[in-house]
Image (cartoon, helix red, strand yellow):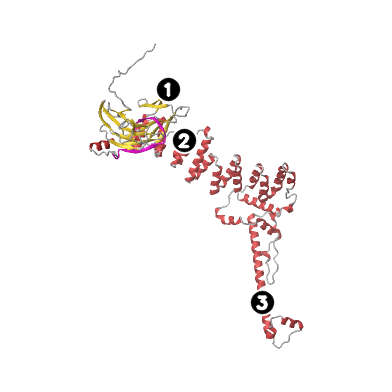
Amino acid sequence: RRIHHYTAQALRNKAFGQALDFVWSGTGTGDYCIRESISKIKFFKNFKESKSIRPATSSAEGLFGGNCVGVKGGDGSILFYDWDSGSFIRKIDVDAKEVYWSESGNMVCIATGDSAYVLSYDAQATAAAVAMGQVDEEVGIEGTFDLLYEISDTVTSGKWVGDCFIFLNNAGRLNYIVGGKVQTLVHLETSAAGTTKHAVLGYLSKENRVYLIDKGLNITSYSVMLSVLEYQTAVMRGDFDSANELLSTIPESEYTTVARFLESQGFKEEAMAVTTDPDHKFDLSLELGHIDIAHSLMEEIPEEDKDATDTMTKWKRLSDAALKDSNFDLCEAASVASNDYAGLLLMYSAIGNHAGMEDLAISAQAGGKTNIAFSAYFLTGNVEACADILIATNRLPEAAFFARTYLPSRVDEIVALWKADLTEVSESAAEALISPSMDKSSFPDFDVAVQVEEMFLAQRASTKETGISGTDYLSAKADLDLDLIGLVKSRNQPPEAEPVEGTEVAAEEKVPEEEMDVDGGEEDEALKAEMEAQAAAAAAAAEEEARIAAEMEEQAQTEAENAAAAEPEEQAEPADEAVEKKDTMDDFGDDW
């Protein structure tokens, strides 16, 4: 047994007749329109026929109701007519599938097969043109429709709520659009073919919910805050006073939605002030250059999330923003927090932060970033640590060559490790390796290189606490080109200047042998000054010797010429040797 309850009044017949299509007016009660044939449209006012027209198209294929009568043309267009006068308003060249009018009648959405177009409609311009008889039967009325924006999606059903259009697309997404910005509310279940199974029934502002129905006639609803839609509408109209008043009526849980809408419209400062989402606020603060706000947000991250990948990424973004703003302290702090070793290496080397570079080397090595650790150790002069890194990473050939250049005292140790490692691959190749302890003749100037290493380590120790002042840049730069091995060799074996007639080397200018002892323990700067003075003295002595030799040669030539001119013409030539010599002098004897 079934019990049926009916609350509606009894339905009575008001009018009847034949028609291909039927549509209601969006304004007048009892006003409707029918398509009687492909060439005739009839208007009814309060259920009474008021007029009939022949559309300005070859074939009327359908009707659309609303604030204007829409006639679908056979040429892929839609023609709009006025309800009251039946006057032709405008022709729009789109193949319309459905037409959705807003409740106020000032906006209309024309849905096509793969997109939709939202237009504004000026009803007052239409009424004025009709009243003044300024309607062109071919063109219609200028300025009545204007395109606002296009929806690049397939609209299957929709409903206007104020100036907001809620619609379903073919992929089963429930969206709404305000000012050309589409926002997705929910993803719905689709059919096996991937198309939507729902349609929009309507919206109840009292409940703040939109209602949908599927093909099984099941009704579902989703929350859409009317206050949010009204706020967004006010923003789009530029009515910020009303928007600020409406903001207080919006629940705080919807603030992030409002903020994202404001951001999409270019109001990023307002969006940052409204949003309650820390991630959204962080992104906006960086875009707006408020790195202090972004830093405070990072410091508020819970302890359990500080090592998360997302947190590290944020620190890196903050570091880049701080560097762009020349805030080096914040840049360093953010880079340390994000373990941005490469960024720290770049910054420390650029600003000359020696202590920071040392800390970076240790932390990078602990973090497994051996390339950066090697570079940091090398820039700080810690060549021992560089060699240890190469050994620890089993880069023994590189370690051996590195030691040959910077740590000759460890060549034997590293070559032994290399031989042991290479033995596992090829014993013959391992046997081919030699070290200084095996054959020192294969390592030219090896003992001198060990002495230079000791000088380098002593110099590094003397400047470790204070470093080298920037004012000493020019002299320090010149030191890079010094041939230390050549200098040490020249000090061990000083060149002996040959005695030159008429000159003497003062005893006090000579360098005693005992002062050239490399192991004498003198300071490196004194050693360098001594070698430079010795080289300068040797060069001066050589120059003086060359000058004296030139003067003596010139003097001898002058004396020979004078002696030849003073000989008497009658003096006889010496013996046969002199005669023979005279014959070879280009006949000078004949002239005499």
Where residue 510 sits: x, y (%)? Answer: 68, 63
Quadrant in which the C terminus is drawn: bottom right
Viewer-nearest residue: 136 or 246? 136
Q: Main secondary structure of the magenta part?
A: strand
Where residue 475 sits: x, y (%)? Answer: 58, 57
Where residue 359 sits: x, y (%)? Answer: 58, 43
Numbered badge on residue 216: 1
Q: Which residue is mark 2?
A: 279
Q: CA distance from mark 1 to mark 3?
A: 128 Å
Region rendered in magenta: 141-162
Where residue 58 sits: x, y (%)? Answer: 33, 35
Viewer-nearest residue: 146 or 136? 136
Structural crowding at the residue carrying mark 2, measured as other residues with C-alpha within 10 Å and reported as few (<14), some (14–19) or many (≥20): some
Q: Which residue is mark 3?
A: 555
- Which picture quadrant has residue 528? bottom right
**Where is 103 relative to 592, above or below?**
above
